Each structure stands twice: as C-alpha cells, then as structure tokens.
Amino acid sequence: MPTRCPVCGAEMLDLLWLVPALPLLGFLALAVAGGWFSRRTIALIGVGSVGLSLAVAGLVGFAFAGLSGAPGRPYDQILWTWLQISGFGPAIGFYLDSLSLVMMLVITLVGFLIHLYSAEFMLDHGKEPVPAGLGRAGGIGQAGVSAPAGRAGENDSGYRRFFAYMNLFVVAMLTLVLADNLLLLYLGWEGVGLCSYLLIGFWYRDPANGAAAQKAFIVTRLGDVALAIGLFVLLTHLGTLNIQDLMARAAEQWPVGSGLATIAAFLLLGGAIGKSAQLPLQTWLPDAMAGPTPVSALIHAATMVTAGMYLIARTHVLYSLAPIAQTAVAVIGAVTLLLAACSALVQRDIKRVLAYSTISQIGYMFLALGVGAWAAALFHFTTHAFFKALLFLAAGAVIQSLHEEHDIYRMGGLRYALPVTFWTFLIGAASLAGFPLVTAGFYSKDWILWEAWASPLGSPWLWGAGVCGAFLTALYSFRLVFNVFFGEAKTEVGSRPGLMMKGPLIVLAAGSLVAGFLEVPRVLGDVSLFSEFTRSVLPSLETTTSVTTESALQIVTMLAALLGIAVAYVLFLRRPGLVTAVTGTAWGSALSRFWVEGWGFDRLYDTWFVRPFLWVAQANKDDLIDQAYSGLAWLIRQFFAVLHRTQTGQVRWYAAILAAGSVVIVALVVLS
Amino acid sequence: MILVWLIVLLLAAGPAAWMLERRGSQWPRWIALGALAIDLVLALTLWTERETAVSLSNQGVWLADLRIPWIPRFGITFHLALDGLSLLLVLLTVFLGVTAVVASWTEIRERVGFFHFNLLWVLAGVLGVFLAMDLFAFFVFWEVMLVPMYFLISVWGHEHRMYAAVKFFIFTQAGSLLMLIAILGLTFIHAQQTGVVTFDYQQLLGTTMDQTVALWLMLGFFAAFAVKLPAVPLHAWLPDAHTEAPTGGSVILAGLLLKTGAYGLIRFAVPLFPDAAQAFAPVAMVLGMVGILYGAVLAFAQTDLKRLVAYSSISHLGFVLLGVFSWNAVALEGAVMQMLAHGITTGALFILAGALQERLGTRDMRRMGGLWTTVPRFGAITLVFSIASLGLPGSGNFLGEFLVLLGSYRANVLVTVLAALGLVAAVIYSLAIMQRIFHGPADESWTAPDLSTRYLFTLGAMIAVQVWLGLYPQPVLDTAGQALQNLRGFGETTALISRR
C-alpha cells in the first residue's frame, strides 16, 4: 500500500524529484530575479527552498521506510531519457535506496541548518577577511588582507549571489547522490565542483581567493578526468551506465581480480580521491578555506568532500571484484588520515586545523571502505557531517565575534563570553575526538577501527594507523578547545551570535551526541539500527573475532582518545612551555614547518607541474608554429628582394645576363 | 524550393542593405535582421517538418532536394539537398547570423550598408556550403564565403586588420586550391571509369580507385577542411583573423566558418574516400589530440581576450577532428554536438569580448580585473559561457566532448586518454577568463554600463539553447543520427571502416 502525501494526495515516493527541484527553483529565482528582492526575501527564498526540500525529503524517507524503519524496495524515478545513441541511453532519473536516502537526508538537514545560519552570518559579508600570513610558512598563497571594498560589493548582490550559489550546490549534491546512472552522477559531481569553485572564490577581489578557487577546480578536475575515463571503460565493456545494471553485469562478466575491473576501480578511485581530498590530490582542501565559513561547513566538510566515499560505496560491487584497488583504498585512507592529522596538529588558523581534520576523517571513511566496511563508512559520514559542520559553524561564530581573527593563539578564554558557542564547540570537538560512550564520533570511529582489525580484508597495521590517528585527533581537537576557550582572553569579543546562528549550532550538537546511538557495538548495548537499515545495499562482511577481542580493541580506542585529551590538557593548558621547548629545537621547528606546509606536497607539485606548465605556456605564448609561417613569409620576401634587384631597367645588364645564360646553356649542351 | 529561398533571400537582401543605407544607417541593420528572421522561420519550418519530410520527398536520404541544370556539358547541376546534418547546421547559421547582426548594432558605425552586404553574403555562402550536393556548386559557395569575409576583416577590423585579412585569405585559398585539384581529379577518374562526367555528390560516392590516388585526393580535400577547421599545424591564420575581425565577423568565423571545415570532413572527405580516410585516421586523430592540448596551452598564455577565445576554438575543434576520424556513431554524434555547442558558446564569448572592447577600448586582460563589481550581469553571463566552454555537464559542450571521447576510446585508447587531459587544460584557460577580467583587484577604475536589454535577450537565448542541447539533446541527436547513419553507410558498404 503506497503512502500518500497528506497535502497533495500524490504518492509520496513520486515527490522524490521535488527534493532537488525545489532548491533549483530557488537558484533560478535568485539568479534571474534576485536583483529586485530585499535581503529578507532573498534569505526566505534561499533558506526556504532548502527547508522545503528537507520537508519533502523527510516525507519521501517516511514513505520509503515507513514507521517500522525497515527499508522498502528501491525506487527508481525516471524523469526523461537524457540521450539515446546506439544502445547507450542514460536517463535523467533518481534512484532511492537506503544508501541514497541516508545521503539525501543528511544533505538536506545539514544543508538547511547551514543555510539558516548563513542568513544571519552573511548579513554583514564584510566580516570575514582572509587571515594575513597565517597557516603556511611565509604566508604563501594566503597573503594579504584585501581592501574592505573587495568584500562582495557594497550592495545586496553578494548576499544574493551567496544564496544562489548555495542553492545550486544543494541541487548538484542531491543530483550526485540520487542519480541512477553514472553520467547523471557525473553531472552532479562536476556541478558541486563548480559551486565549490564559485564559493571558495566568493570574495573575488582578493587574488589569493581566486587562486585557491581555481586550484580546487583544477586539482579535482584531474580526478574527474580519471573518473570520466572510468566511465568510458565501464560503458564500452559493460554497455550501460545505469548503476544497478552496471554492478549486476560486472559481477556477472568479470571474475574477481579481472584486469578490467581493476582498471575501472582505479579510475573511479582517481575521481574519488580528487573530490574527497585524499592523497595525493588533497592539496586543494586547506586552501579552500578561503571561502566563507558556512561554505567550508557545507561543502568542504559535511557533503561534497564525502562524494568520493559515496561513489565507492555506491560501486562497492566493483571494488569487491578488484581486491588490489580495494586495498589501495584502505592504504590511501590510512596514510591520509595520519598525514593530515599531523598537519592539523600544527596549524595556527582555526579553519585550516578543521580542514586537515576533514581530510583525516575522510581518510577514516576510505579506510572503512577499503576493508569492506561500507556501512561503517556511511555511518562515519553521517556523524562527521554533524560534528564537523558544527565545528565549522562554531568556529565561524568565534571568528566573527573576534573581528575576523583566525589565529588560535590570539584567541583564548572565550568560554564565558560565548557560552553557547563554547558548549556546542566542546561537544563537536569531543565527538571528533571520539570521547567514549556519549559522543557519536566515538561509535562511528570505533566501528571502523574494529572492522579494520576484524574484517577479512583488515590488518593490525591498518588498525594501528587508525588508533594512532584517533590519538592525534583527540590531541588536535582539544588543542583547539584549550587554546580558544580556556586560558586568558587575548582578543576583545565584538559581536555575539544571534538566534539564527545559535539554533543550528544546538541542533547539530544534539546530532553529534545522539546520532551515535543508531549503532552501538554488542558489548556496549548492541544496537544495529543503522547496519540493519543499510544491509540490503551495503552488505557487511563476516567477522570472526571473539567478544573478548572486541572489548579489548574498544578499550584501546577509548584509551587513545582519552590519552589524546589528557596530553592536550598538559601540553596546551598546564605546561605550554613544553611545546615551545620542542618546536624551539632545530629538528622540532623543521618538522613543525614541514607539517604546517602539509608535507611539502604543494612545493612538489609547484616544481614538477605548475612551473613547467607556466614555462611552456609562456615560452610558446606567440605560437612557434605561427612564427614558422612568419619565417617562411620573411624568406619569400628576402627572395623577392634579391630578385627584384635584377630588375634594374638597364639594357646593358639584361644583355650581359642574356649572353651569360646562353653561354651556360650552350656549354651544358656541348659538354654533356 | 525552400532551400533556394534560404540562400536567395540573403543574396538579395545584401545589395538592398547596401543601397538603402542612403535612407539612414538603421536601414541595413533592419533589412539584415528581417532577412535572417525570415530565414530562421523557414529553417524552423524545415525543422518541424523533419519527421514527415523524408517520406514525402521520395529521395531516400534527403529531407528536401532540388536540382536545376546548370552547365550540363560538364555534368554540373545546381543541386541543393538537405539532410539532418545540414538542417542542424543551417539552423545554427541562421541563429548565429541573427546574433551577429545584433552584436554589430552599435559597434559598426561606418559603411553600415556595405558591412551588412558582406555579412549577408558570407552567410549565404555558408548556407550554400551546407546545402550544395554538387561538388562544383559546393566549391563556388566555398569561395563565396571567402571574399566577403576578407572585406569584413580588412575594412571593419582592429589594429592589424590588413595583415590578418591577407593571412586568412592566403591560408584558405591555398587549401581551396588543393581541394579544387582533388575535385577535378575525382571527376576525371569517375568519367574515365563510367564515361559520365559529373560533379554530383551522390554519383561520385563509391567511385573506386587506386589506393594511392585515393589517398592523395582525400588529402586534397583534407587540406582545405583542415585549414578551415583548423587543425594544428594549419591553424596559424585563425588567431589573427578572429582577433582582428569585428565582433560580427568573429562570431561568424568561429561559429560557422570553422564548422564548414568540420562539415566538409564529415560530408566529403571521409565518405568519398572511405579506405583512404581509414588509413589516414590515426594521423588525423593524433592531429586532433595535439590540437586539443596545443590550443589549450596557447589559450592560457594569451593576454588578449579575443586571442584567448580564438585559441580555445582550436582546442575545441580538435575534439571534432578526433570524433570525425573515429567514425563511429557515438563519436560522430559527439562531433556534431560539439560543432553546435561550440558555435553557440564561442559565438557568445566573442559577443561578450566585443561588448567589453566597445566599453573599455581594450582587449588586454592585463588592464582588467575586478570588473564584476562594475558590471555584474556581464560577469554572470561570461561565467555561464566560460563554464560551458570548459565542458561542464549540463552544457552541449560537455555532451559533445564526452561522446567524442567515448567514441574515440573505442578507436584508440591512448589518444583518447591524452585528449581527455584537454578537459583539465580547458578548466585552466576558461577560469583564467573569469579571474583576469572579473575577479581580482581592479587595477584601473573602469566605469562602464552593464549589458543592455538587447544583449541580455540575445545571450539569454543562447544560454537557453545551450542548456537545451545539454539536457534534452535527443531531438538534435535523432536529426543528426539519421544523416550520419547514411554517411557511415557509404563507408561501410565498402566494408572497411568498421570499428565496432
């Protein structure tokens, strides 16, 4: 018995297309007619369209799962056939199963909260300049506070532009996760990349922002090209891009370990690491912090950067056929999570700490995917969306209150001045750190770590990397908490966040606590709502580990987090001298600089790719081929110049040459 | 008859525009616009009737067909015919013709009548090229395009217009000469074999000949079309011509004249010499790939906006060359889609560049920056076409490039992978347009009016067509598909070009 909409009477699942269509309408309204709207109307359209989308998504989710919470049958809604050529016929069609449902609900919910927050935050868009010389040694790439005039103009066009881009982003992101074929997914994939570019470069007057935006687009496009070639491989050899058919045919036609499956899986992985900022294409994400903070929260933490995780989870059948590729996913995840955590530890810019933290947490998701724990990756995505969005939004509130101060060493003592921000940030940080038992981050990370050990694809090495990462995560999370909210105040608090900013913080904080209880390990209470709900799409692997081992592993995870917090307490609150003593040594400062610069990747790419490209472009600016033609033209002109000298008009000359010529010819005839 | 009217209308409106300039400079503009509007209606009529036209015409492959004896002694007929491929290109021609007139409305203030005469005659020549199915008539139209274009550049162009115009003329004419020899050679061989002297396209199809001869004749055609396309290394005329031409001229050059090269390859070079074309395909595909990358790197290096867009055309047309010589259904559809989408995107970018030059008096992007604040609508619309130019899904450019690469992947994996890197390079130069002009600090404080309503409507229509091509391309693909299938049939009856 299909569920019907209480308002319109239509079958509720049929409303699925409205979920992306409503923000699209919002975008079109703002883009075409936004010039005539007041700020109130702009906010109403921008926030309202996503709010309505959330409402419809909720209805659809209800229709899909019902009251019992058991997932229904997958639902495919085809709007129209995109194109049809010789058997290749991708549709503009949306596919709903428990995986895309979870993604859709998180995107619309977190998206709505962030839009709401932005309605207040972006009112004074002159309020968030780029920090001067922060983050990297020498301040490359982030240089200079630009003139206030650079802040999105003096009229409302910045406000409108912001919400138009944000709405468009939500459309693209929903298209990405709902697409029933890889070509439509690719449309969403590139669409979110475009919006990311537009919003990183939102304050366009500062060339550093433009550089960061272009870097993000170009680096992710490298991955996208790999993804596109992956599409060619899949389509050529399996004859379709419809994801469900594709997976079925792959499982049918390709044996485990087959070359084509491996190539295809690696190509898709190329796209995934670009979008999800994993090694070696992670360099764009820290710079992406040039965008407004709500953008960082929505695009560069909660949703877009997890698209790689979604892609791999969506095509997990393919990865099961390509063990080498799957191992690569796990290794990339493990290495990335460690490298990024180290970098997060030494950044001074609060947003850059969170950016590296995001890279690191997505590393955990990749680790989970790599060991076949698909559902655990999705679960960590969900909890991460809550606590990381929360951390960014709270950081935005702090930055705004302190007159655009990004440097955590110039913050401090804010727990009394900004109590709501403090408590919500604390919850977010605790969740990120995996504070045992009460936070969502603990349950999702614990699940991943357990699978990294116990899964047939897992190994103690992967588990060990994850545990080290957990310690580092706790350390850098509470480095933030202690430096920003404890100690003495170093900067005067200006404005304080209003209701529209506090509300989303509180809701996200609640989510960062309770979302974890959807999946609790058997020792601690044995809840498996989440894995049950997603089982039909994301099967779990058989594990054989005993309860004792499981408990032991859990205790290690808990200890890692607690130890991290304790060390942070000692290093950053009780004995700050210790840190300066270490970084004061030659080795300590060199290592710290190396980590601040993100392990030197930027410099490497600069030397090997950027500079050679610029050199070639500059060297060939005038087009050597064209020069060759010019040379030819010059030669002909010279030839002409020589010949035309013979035309002197003097009969003597002509007679002499005539005679000489005759002699030569006669000589030739006679002598030959 | 409608086919003749399409051309004759423009040919007649040309002198009318020239004569009536005496009555006022608005006259030529309105006459040109009126003639093109009528043409647009006629072309749209053909479009709406395309479903039924094949069965009615009794001509098999043609939607419309017309033969008028011309010089019977040499087997020359004035043979115009229209299939789906021609129809799409005719629509593009008339549509871009309208936009070119609108874009020249305020820019051209001197010798307005003669300008519109040339404009209309170029367009008539282009229409003739797309419709002529007699090689002699085709060659005549091919030359008709050339001379008015030469005048458009040399009279109304910018600083180095004479140099650019002469270069354009020499390059094109050298290619045309080779094609003329090839046409005569083909006719001669056909006459030797059958005793019938004819220039008719359909009769010449399937002429059998020696492999070497076929290769040389094919190269004769290829030379002319590769210059027009342009394929690296024959592209040197293009940046100068596009940059120096007035806006309307640039729109027609990039949007239409380049397409005559691509059309020639699809219509003549490959079907007339399928075996030779197949033998030559690897070389041509590599040339296409090189063009994609070479054009893209050069585009990025430019400081002159129009030059940047001109080099980006070389890159985009590289995809067409790659697609045509992959010669399978998918790649050919992609090539056609790329031709249409490139015509609109690049046409729009040249219109924007022209409007910018009209306002600022310069095309030098080093002097620009931060213009979004001054002219936000200008920035937003340029953004739309920049991202179409980098092939974002949702635009026709994306489908064109995607289908070309998908098709060429089946023909040659390595070339395809290298060509796909052009997608990254396209991002680099397309975003550079936005960064250098509209973003960044404002070095000079320009004050300029934003786009007027007339431009907003024109460019809005171009955006609408672009999105339509990107999201609902099936009518276009179907229209082209039938024609392409027939053309591929000529190749496949000789059973040699069949790559899966």
Image (cartoon, helix red, strand yellow):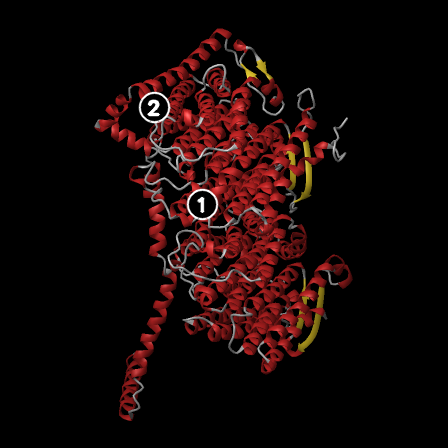
The spot of residue A157 in percent (x, y) is 52, 49
- Name the residue nearer the viewer: A298 or B409: A298
Closer to the camera in the image, B274 or B429? B429
Q: Label 1: chain? A: A
Residue visible at 38% across and 48% down in the picture: A147
The Cα–Cα distance between marks 1 and 2, rounded to whole angstroms, is 35 Å
Question: Mark 2 = which residue?
Answer: A487
Q: Tell me, yes or no, whether dots 1 and 2 are on the same chain.
A: yes
Q: Earlier in the sequence, mark 1 or mark 2?
A: 1
Please name the residue that numbered disc 1 is placed on. Answer: A201
For image coordinates 47% across by 65% down, the residue present is B359
**Do callouts 1 and 2 mark residues in contact (Cβ within 8 Å)?**
no
Q: Residues within 10 Å of mark 2 (few under 14, many from 20)?
A: some
Dot 1 falls on a residue whose secondary structure is loop
> What amino acid is found at the position of numbered circle 1 in the picture?
Gly
Q: Where is B92 relative to A442, above or below?
A: below
The answer to whether residue B359 is above or below residue A227 is: below
When the figure is inspected, residue B118 is found, relative to residue B432, above or below; the finding is below
Q: Is residue B58 above or below residue A278?
A: below
Q: Position of residue B477 (x, y in %)?
A: 65, 52
Number of the label disc, if any, that sits on residue A444:
none
Q: Nearer the viewer, mark 1 or mark 2?
A: 2
Q: Quadrant of residue B233?
A: bottom left
Q: Amino acid at mark 2?
A: Gly
* Residue placed most toward the observer, A616 or A381: A381
Which corner quadrant of the image does residue A555 belong to? top left
